[in-house]
Image (cartoon, rainbow, N blue to C red):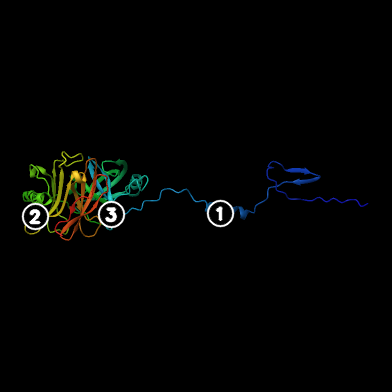
């Protein structure tokens, strides 16, 4: 009988669930359990692939904003800036709101008015200085759409040291404009009388109830001279049974009338009229803020602030032919379709 020969066999095995064994005896066969080795280049490749294939967590995408128009108001030795609207090729465009962009105010502040930002200041279309943003300052809820605020210091030409309100654009939008002298404009007696006479002619045309006193109904009158105009323009607001401020009208018969007027050769005539009946469209009293060529198309536009029952909002008027038209009105719950018309077209 032949003697059986036994050979030692090295059998590589991978056993799952046995994690703490080095040597195992089984049926007379001694086995050594080892973790399968992975080539260095394979391990490096797997790590690299994992790094490439695992995307980083997504944060909010940057806002796709064009340049913004700002309103800057002096407060003692410093000033506060508020964004008005986005300057788009076709005119002003509403700022993104929380309904379409989460954390809209924070993201607008971060994108357009962070500390260290410089805004170029204008009055009546003339560059008069710079606003240096020092800090963000919360949210302004006085307007129908909440807006971020920033605070900072003013750097002004001597002629503008007494000014309280400015329009502003980013440095990239207006930094190439030269500093210019600023001369405040004041209405003349002739212009104030002309405004009263034009209002008296407009009341029956619009079907407006006559106020007890036309002079008392005139709530605001300002004169300005936009670049390229035929001469000074007067911007006038009349109110009936109401006040030039945010709050409910005094009567269901309340109305407001805003118009621009120019001397067309035979005296002043309205070139833009905006009449609004509070009971039909909601309160919305426009008043003149300032003018400048914010979209750099060669013509000055006019910024208006509109005062409603509970809040306020912005609108803009742009030149068209011999007259003007309402080119923008911020979408707000208080706003209605309005009845702004461009006269003189």
Q: Which residue is mark 1?
A: 49
Residue 87: image tag: 3
User: x%, y% of residue 317?
Assistant: 20, 53
Cα separation, mark 3 vs mark 1, equals 45 Å
Q: Which mark is residue 268?
A: 2
Is 333 on the left or on the right of 231, as rendered?
right
Q: Disc 3, disc 2: CB below 8 Å?
A: no
The percent coordinates of residue 164 (x first, y second) are 20, 44
> Which of the two residues, 224 or 263, is positioned nearer the viewer here?
263
**Residue plotted at (58% across, 55% down):** 45
Mark 3 against mark 2, which lies toward the viewer? 2
Q: Earlier in the sequence, mark 3 or mark 1?
A: 1
Residue at the spot x=62%, y=55% of the render? Answer: 42
Residue situated in front as seen by the camera: 249 or 95: 249
> Picture coordinates of residue 86 (x, y %)?
29, 52
Q: Is residue 263 left or right of residue 21?
A: left
Do we see residue 158 in this rendering?
no
Can I make out residue 107 in this image? yes
Q: In the figure, is residue 213 to the left or right of 167?
A: left
10 Å crowding of disc 1: few (<14), some (14-19), many (20+): few
Q: Nearer the viewer, mark 2 or mark 1?
A: 2
């Amino acid at each position: 009988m032949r003697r059986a020969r036994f050979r030692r066999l090295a059998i590589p095995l991978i056993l799952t669930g046995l994690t703490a064994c080095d040597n195992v005896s089984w049926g007379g066969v001694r086995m050594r359990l080892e973790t399968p080795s992975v080539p260095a280049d394979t391990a490096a490749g797997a790590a690299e692939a994992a790094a490439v294939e695992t995307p980083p967590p997504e944060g909010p995408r940057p806002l796709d904003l064009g340049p913004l128009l700002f309103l800057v108001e002096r407060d003692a030795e410093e000033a506060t800036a508020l964004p008005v609207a986005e300057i788009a090729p076709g005119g002003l465009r509403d700022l993104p709101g929380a309904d379409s962009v989460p954390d809209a105010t924070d993201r607008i502040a971060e994108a357009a008015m962070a500390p260290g930002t410089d805004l170029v200041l204008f009055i009546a279309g003339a560059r008069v200085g710079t606003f240096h943003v020092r800090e963000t300052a919360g949210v302004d809820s006085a307007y129908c759409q909440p807006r971020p605020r920033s605070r900072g210091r003013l750097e002004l030409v001597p002629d503008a040291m007494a000014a309280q309100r400015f329009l502003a654009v980013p440095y990239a939008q207006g930094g190439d404009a030269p500093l210019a002298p600023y001369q405040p404009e004041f209405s003349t007696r002739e212009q104030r009388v002309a405004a009263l006479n034009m209002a008296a002619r407009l009341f029956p045309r619009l079907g407006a109830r006559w106020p007890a006193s036309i002079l008392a109904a005139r709530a605001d009158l300002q004169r300005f001279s936009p670049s390229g105009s035929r001469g000074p323009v007067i911007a006038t607001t009349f109110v009936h049974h109401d006040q030039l401020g945010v709050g409910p009208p005094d009567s269901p018969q309340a109305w407001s009338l805003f118009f621009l007027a120019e001397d067309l050769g035979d005296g002043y005539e309205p070139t833009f009229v905006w009449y609004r009946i509070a009971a039909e469209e909601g309160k919305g009293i426009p008043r003149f803020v300032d003018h400048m060529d914010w979209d750099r198309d060669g013509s000055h536009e006019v910024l208006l602030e509109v005062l409603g029952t509970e809040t306020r909002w912005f609108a803009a008027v742009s030149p068209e032919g011999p007259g003007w038209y309402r080119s923008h009105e911020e979408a707000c719950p208080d706003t209605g379709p309005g009845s702004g018309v461009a006269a003189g077209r």
